[in-house]
Amino acid sequence: MNKRTYGLRYATVVMLLAVLIPSLSLAQRANAKLAQTGMKFLNVSAHARQAALGEAFTAADGYSASMFYNPAGMARLGMFAEASLGRVNWIADIEHTFASVAFAPWDGDYGVFGFTFQYVNYGEIQSTILANNANGYLDVGTIKPNATMFGLGYARSLTDKFSIGANVKVVTQDLGTGITKTSYVTGTDGLATGIKDPEQQQFKLKNVVAFDFGVMYRTGFESLTLGMTVRNFAREVTYQKEGFQLPLTFKLGMAMNVMDLFAINRETQSLLLSVDAEHPRDFPEQIRVGAEYLFLNSFAFRIGYVTPADEYSLSYGLGFQHSLAGTKFALDYSYTPFGVFNNVQRFSLRFGF
């Protein structure tokens, strides 16, 4: 058996294991884990490229945005510095903004350092209070909930095959100001028409610390790479009287340029195939599959698939990248039909030198 045939069989076995093992418990656990975590915005995909691949990016070499998926992917940055910016038009008119920066000083001899930022704008939400009137409530203005995340990451290649990475994140979620106690103004009919002397409280979760860990291993067969990551590892968070966990997620993945298996021109094109098996805290196990065809090393066409899923399963995307005078830049776009919600669109820009 030659090397190519053995490698193809090896890749097939790994892919089948990644798909079949988590599937054994899907039927039994379909709904048991739903709504078990808070701060779910931490799981919203940051970058258009990764989102278009169904977020199957655990074993794919990346750049600064890898800190949102598998921090070990940042280890092979391949340049001195790189930055990524992203905008997500999420469901219910929620807006996510992301940024990441990575740099490898001293030719990367001491690893790659990175910073991440995420901001969530939930928009204006009408604030009400229970009242004895025809509506059963009174309008008391609006609130503007938001959330932020700041992260510090580090990744390093320990050998030419094995890389590790980690992030530490500080998360804050501001749910606005609420009225905890008040007196009511009543009309002649005894029904409430307003409030007076309200006691207010700021509902805010501050400085919640979470960690991400990841590893990547190049098998030595062509470009086949295996990856593993644990994201959002943190203590239980208490809000008022109730405690909840962050959306802890464990992933195993594999990725490969399948053009390596065929005797065709690989200098100007590639076909990345990536498969992830995901074990989230608050949802049944999922399989994520993504494919990216890169033509002339510039034009990218992407598709991703997730199963099982509630409102979305397919994602699509386009990208363009170019190098000029030692500077690399790329534009990426993804589109995800989201069932009864609005379609989700993502836009990303990245550049490095």
Image (cartoon, grey):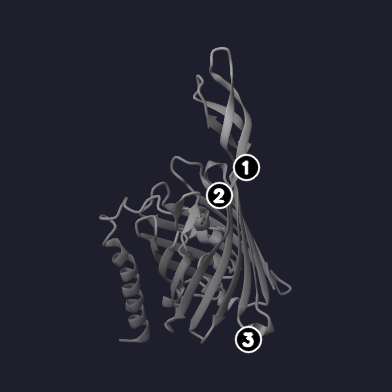
Q: Nearer the viewer, residue 322 or 47?
A: 47
Q: Residue at x 54, y 66 (%)?
A: 294
Q: Is residue 249 left or right of residue 78?
A: left
Residue 184: percent from the left, percent from the top?
58, 25
Q: Is residue 13 left or right of residue 98?
A: left
Check disc 3 and give the amino acid type: Asp
Q: Nearer the viewer, mark 3 or mark 1?
A: 1
Q: Nearer the viewer, residue 129 or 294?
A: 129
Q: Residue furthest right?
A: 325
Check disc 1 and give the amino acid type: Lys
Q: Residues within 10 Å of mark 3 (few under 14, many from 20)?
A: few
Q: Nearer the N terminus, badge 2 or badge 3?
A: 3
Q: Secondary structure at mark 3?
A: loop
Q: Which residue is mark 1?
A: 144
Q: Nearer the viewer, residue 1 or 132?
A: 132
Q: Is residue 342 above or below residue 224?
A: above
Q: Is residue 33 at least partly visible in the picture?
A: yes
Q: Secondary structure at mark 2?
A: strand
Residue 75: percent from the left, percent from the top?
56, 77
Q: Residue at x 59, y 70 (%)?
A: 63
Q: Which residue is mark 2?
A: 345
Which part of the image, by quadrant, shows the N terminus? bottom left
Q: Which residue is mark 3?
A: 109
Q: Residues within 10 Å of mark 1 (few under 14, many from 20)?
A: some
Q: Residue at x 66, y 84 (%)?
A: 107
